[in-house]
Image (cartoon, rainbow, N blue to C red):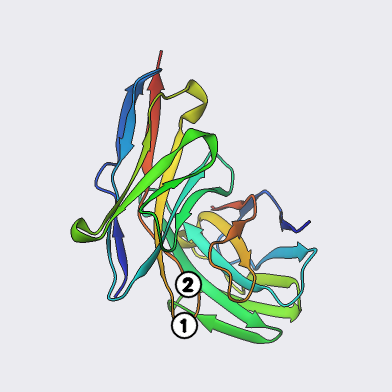
Amino acid sequence: SQTIHQWPATLVQPVGSPLSLECTVEGTSNPNLYWYRQAAGRGLQLLFYSVGIGQISSEVPQNLSASRPQDRQFILSSKKLLLSDSGFYLCAWNRQGVYGYTFGSGTRLTVV
Amino acid sequence: AQSVTQPDIHITVSEGASLELRCNYSYGATPYLFWYVQSPGQGLQLLLKYFSGDTLVQGIKGFEAEFKRSQSSFNLRKPSVHWSDAAEYFCAVGGKTGFQKLVFGTGTRLLVSP
């Protein structure tokens, strides 16, 4: 069966520090991968998605970047965090052509 | 552009009472519609989805939703709420063509009173 892992579960980082959040999917190949951010009262905002290794599409301009160095690995990064980067970050995946996502358990990021 | 509106930010329901969570969408073609549930500090779990066919779809945990094209709605219902249903519920819409991006509503937080 397929599983999705996200880590860390919680993170407190100072303003200006770098960020790296990791997401991996097991039990499938060539998944579509997504990063969403959830801010209080604002629902889920799609940040990045990827259809393959090295293929990243950005939905909104921001202080973050994403990379997909391996087929089932999706990384969310920042060189210098801002206070506004605080939120709950969710990774999700689906199979090519199959609608509906499976979500990871999320990372709570607090920038102080 | 796709959009989803969940007009109720919070809803409180007594345990055992019926529940209806509202969802209205905007989409230029035939939509794919989803309901997800999120427990505090957790990821989202798929409750049910509508692609085509019967407009009343059944999901997990006793939930159902009805697609009404004329009203651009996809409301979630449950006949008898349990305390464990307290969570946040998200409606989402996606399209048949192109990449399978989903657009989510802002969510409805369900509180269950004893």
Report, in whole angstroms, how far the alpha carbon at label 2 lies from the one at label 1. 8 Å
- Cβ–Cβ under 8 Å for marks 2 and 1: yes
Q: Amino acid at mark 1?
A: Gly
Residue A105, image x, y percentages = 64, 49
Q: Is residue B20 above or below residue B79?
A: below
Residue A84, image x, y percentages = 44, 61
According to the picture, the residue beneath numbered tag 1 turns out to be B98
Residue reaching furthest front? Answer: B54
Say which quarter of the image contains residue A69.
Answer: bottom right
Say which quarter of the image contains residue B16.
Answer: top left
| Camera-nearest label, 2 or 1 | 1
User: Badge 1 sits on which subunit?
Assistant: B
Q: Residues within 10 Å of mark 2 (few under 14, many from 20)?
A: some
Q: Is residue A33 above or below residue A90?
A: below
Residue B27, image x, y percentages = 29, 70
Residue reaching furthest top? Answer: B114
Residue A11, image x, y percentages = 65, 51
Horizontal side, residue A44 vs residue A89: left or right: left
Tell if the residue under mark 2 belongs to the same chain as the one under mark 1: yes
Q: Residue A90 got which mark? A: none
Image point 70% across, 79% down: which residue?
A68
Image point 57% across, 61% down: which residue?
A101
According to the picture, the residue beneath numbered tag 2 turns out to be B101
Q: Secondary structure at mark 1?
A: loop
